Image (tube, rainbow, N blue to C red):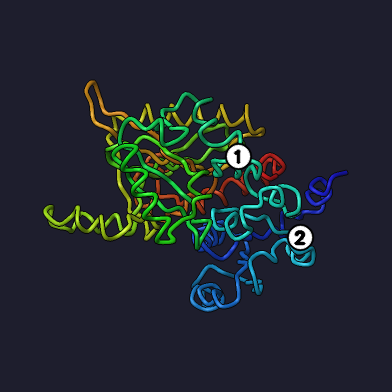
Amino acid sequence: MSWFDSTLAALDPARLTIAVLGSHSALEVCRGAKNLGFPTLVVAQAGRDRTYTERFRSRDGLGCVDDTLVLDAFRRLLDRDVQARLRDRHAVFVPHRSFEVYLDSDYDAIEHAFRVPVFGNRRLLRIEERTLHPNQYDLLEEANIRHPRLFANAAAIDRPVLVKVAEAERGFERAFFVARDRDDYERTAAARISAGVFTHHALEAATIEEFVLGAPVNFNFFYSPIDGRLELIGTDARRQTNVAGLSTLPADIEADVLAAIPLKYEEAGHFAVTVLESMLDPIFEAGERFVEAAARLYPPGVIGPFGLQAIVTPGPPRKDFVVVDVSPRVPGSPGIAATPYSAYLHGRPVSVGERIAMEIRAAIARDRLAEVLT
């Protein structure tokens, strides 16, 4: 019997605890779990724990974090004794982007060494890394979803491109720059390497893709294996530094500022947006094809939340969208509950965190918990 089978057999649904790493969207996961009556546990890192141990701790009918497990480093989540403590709590772990990042994007460890049941398909998480195959581009190709044209190297550049390079200081963050052509690419890359923004080695592994001009909108879905249904939970857009500040600049100095200050797409937050109702059919169809493709490439496929980050482009003949990134887990944008799509379906706004807890409750009630955990 595998560790998963034995752990699942010992998992008591009446004592099940929803656990999550203390970053990214932990509070959203905890609030949703509390709404459905589950105890919550946040694995926090010392020095970054007060949000969970104090400010949103459950007490006097307030808060959503029932318990915390504070470690000296997030990487200790892979320690056997830490995992044993989670299993003793009958924990189901909800992964998000920071879970991957703070385990050093070690997907082999996530898949094989982290022996705690995970909500969702843990094997799908590795598609975020563009250097692995099959990756998100392969999945988008398999799903026949339009994505930016990719360039194998600078010599192939024949149009404006967006270059995504791992930062020198923080390898989990990407440095971005826009280049008009090959010469602009080489000048900008040389300047950024000289400034220490990224290394030559990182540039060799960079993604060079067609620059798509349009309105960014993220389509945040939830696929339910229990009901066999795809839901659009909400739509949002990112607020990123220092790109967001460009719109505040007078046009006559924008070029000078860009020449002096490297463009950054760091996350500052998200805000809720809506889409035209006429676009819902193609959005859903893309999500359905993604679910079908994921089942072929990464069985059992999608379980729970995922996001297609898109650029909406103008017509004629009609508006379309290009998917520029994929989030195969909790999207990390609590504001999407403020958009109307979950309420259109469920009769009230439902956050991603609550939708996860609803799925786990339904799986327990139908004795199908094994179908939503890996």
Report the residue at 37% width, 27% height from top. 281
Question: Mark 2 highlights which residue?
Answer: 87
| In the rendered image, the vertical position of residue 167 relative to residue 346, given as above or below | below
Q: Quadrant of residue 48?
A: bottom right
Pick the front one: 368 or 323: 323
List x then y, in percent, for residue 120.
Answer: 62, 44
| Label 2 crowd (10 A; few <14 / some 14-19 / many >=20) | many
Q: Quadrant of residue 213?
A: top left
Pick the front one: 374 or 38: 374
Report the residue at 71% width, 48% height from top. 108
List x then y, in percent, for residue 73.
Answer: 64, 70
Report the residue at 19% width, 52% height from top. 255
Pick the front one: 140 or 4: 140
Q: The residue under label 1 is which amino acid type?
A: Leu
Horizontal placement of 73 versus 168: left or right? Answer: right
List x then y, in percent, for residue 294.
Answer: 58, 31
Horizontal placement of 369 versus 55: left or right? Answer: right
Instruction: For mark 1, give the secondary structure.
Output: loop
Q: Which mark is residue 132?
A: 1
Identify the image quadrant of the N terminus: top right
List x then y, in percent, for residue 290.
Answer: 51, 30
Q: Residue furthest top?
A: 317
| Label 1 crowd (10 A; few <14 / some 14-19 / many >=20) | few
Q: Which of marks 1 and 2 precedes in the sequence?
A: 2
**Residue 211 seen in the figure:** no
Report the residue at 51% width, 42% height from top. 306
